[in-house]
Amino acid sequence: MERIAAAARKAGRDPGAIALVAVSKQQPDDRVDAVLSTGQRLFGENRVQEAKARWRARRELYPDLRLRLIGPLQTNKAADAVAFFDAIDSLDREKLARALADAAQKQGRCPEILIQVNTGEEPQKAGVPPSDADAFIRAARETYALPIKGLMCIPPVEEEPAMHFALLAKIAARNGLSQLSMGMSDDYETAIRFGATQVRVGSALFGPRT
Ligand SMILES: *Cc1c(COP(=O)(O)O)cnc(C)c1O
């Protein structure tokens, strides 16, 4: 939290405008409980079933817990994800938009939603290509009436992340989106410089994943 605040101040930003998403995927329960005991309440998971197994009971103990799905979502798990998460950060295709909208209508609730952009246009990576982003954002909002709050990206591992963060910020700005989920253990300070409103930190917080 100190390093996030320092990075924010250095960038002339309000430290309170940046949320820490503690990425608890594949971490042992004792480490997760240790982080919970510090007062951290916002967590990110990348799989629906794993998240439910870990958090269902803990949610009873911590009513102010907030859970974000940060990994790719299959359409056949969309209803489960809508029922369980406070936010889904990985919307990236029309078929999933339709499944989320259907589930939200049936359940009478909808998590807030971020659209994942594949800023590096990597074939193996999820996300909308940057050139399709504006049209996809419009469709998600208008055709599917989803509560789109912002964008998420995972830059290519071998590239300088700054240009990817800058691109994501630019796409968000021209579409009037305020949330930017970008930056992980190795690059969250850079992401803050480029406007991240939430950083997703796993190993730097919990140690290496099991
Ligand atoms: C695992 C994961 C993270 C956290 O990665 P670290 O390098 O451990 O901080 C962040 N975002 C996503 C989408 C992830 O899958």
Image (cartoon, grey):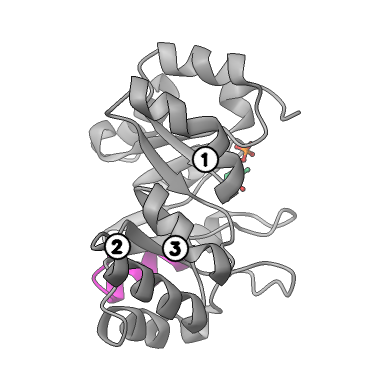
Mark 3 or mark 1, which is nearer the start of the sequence? Answer: 1
- Asked whether 85 or 157 is in front, the reply is 85
Residue designated by label 1: 52
Q: Is residue 84 above or below residue 74?
A: above
Residue contact between numbered discs 2 and 3, judged by CB atoms under 8 Å: yes
Q: Where is residue 156 shown, x and y percent of the image?
A: 68, 59
What is the C-alpha distance between the residues marked 2 and 1? 18 Å
For residue 103, side relative to residue 26 (left or right): left
Residue contact between numbered discs 2 and 1, judged by CB atoms under 8 Å: no
- Amino acid at dot 1: Lys
Q: What range of the chain is rendered magenta?
A: 166-177
Quadrant of image for the N terminus: top left
In the rendered image, residue 130 lying in the magenta stretch gets the answer no
| The quarter of the displayed image where residue 205 is located | top right
- Amino acid at dot 2: Gln
Q: Residue at x 74, y 69 (%)?
A: 124
Q: Residue at x 54, y 40 (%)?
A: 51
Q: Where is residue 187 shown, x and y percent of the image?
A: 57, 41
Residue 134: numbered disc: none
Residue designated by label 2: 107
Helix, strand or loop status at disc 3: helix
What is the C-alpha distance between the residues marked 1 and 3? 13 Å
Residue designated by label 3: 79
- Amino acid at dot 3: Ala
Crowding at dot 3, Cα within 10 Å, few <14 / some 14-19 / many 20+, comes out as: some
